[in-house]
Amino acid sequence: MRQEHLVSLNIHSNARSLPVVRGAVEQLASSEGFDATETHGLVLAIDEALANVIKHGYNGQSDQPITVTLSVVQSDTGRRGLAIEVRDQGRQVDPTSICGRDLDDVRPGGLGVHIIKAVMDEAAYSCPSEGGMCLRMVKFVGEHPSAK
């Protein structure tokens, strides 16, 4: 997969930073040919990812670093897409333990991981050796996860 880095945003773990990131994702997605539904899904996925970092990685602290990197990618088959990487310095957890709660448990909250996996074509968590967590998400133009 070929990747062209376009935007890197360094923000704090503060909800007031989220509109800036949402706007950047929305603008880049639109300029890369994503339709309105796909763009909305990308914005929802980044919003959920950042909310999870703030709540779980930083326990609600509003002054901790988060880096969001947006890149245009091209698959080996020539499909264009958008890669979004969310990097924090928060608490590390085993990536295999990251899952949404049981969908039969009807109550507010706890659906961020489900939303990310439903909207994105790829989503992978990792524990960088220098600490924190990294989430890499990829969405290809025109690829609807329900069509897989």
Image (cartoon, helix red, strand yellow):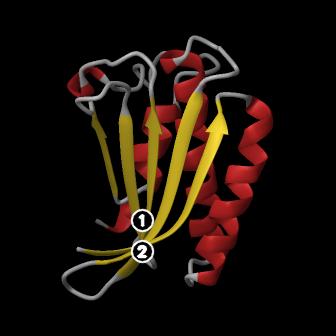
Q: Is residue 60 above or below residue 131?
A: above
Quarter assignment of residue 59:
top right
The residue at the far bottom in this view is: 78
Task: Give the percent coordinates (x, y) of residue 10.
Answer: 61, 45
Q: Residue at x 26, y 20 (%)?
A: 97
Q: Residue at x 45, y 79 (%)?
A: 142
* Residue placed under numbered mark 1 in the picture: 139
The answer to whether residue 79 is visible is yes
Amino acid type at image mark 2:
Gly
Judging depth in this view, the residue of 101 and 93 nearest the camera is 93
Comparing 4 with 146, the one in front is 4
Going from N to C along the chain, the mark reached first, 1 or 2, is 2
Splitting the image into 4 quarters, where does residue 79 fall? bottom left
For the C terminus, give its image quadrant.
Answer: bottom left
Amino acid type of disc 1? Lys
State the residue at coordinates (23%, 74%): 1
**Rendering coords of residue 43 (x, y %):** 63, 55
Give the farthest residue toward the top.
59
Judged from this view, the residue extending furthest toward the front is 130
Eyeballing the image, is 38 above or below 35? above
Identify the mark at residue 91; answer none if there is no mark: none
Q: Residues within 10 Å of mark 1 (few under 14, many from 20)?
A: many
Observer-nearest of 125 and 129? 129
Q: Report if the CB atoms under discs 1 and 2 are less than 8 Å apart.
A: yes
Of helix, strand and loop, which one carries label 2? strand
Residue occupying the point 75% across, 51% down: 20
Q: Residues within 10 Å of mark 2 (few under 14, many from 20)?
A: many
Residue wearing tag 2: 81
Q: CA distance from mark 1 to mark 2?
A: 5 Å
- Helix, strand or loop at disc 1? strand
Residue 141 as seen in the image, left or right of residue 93: right
The answer to whether residue 24 is above or below residue 130 is: below
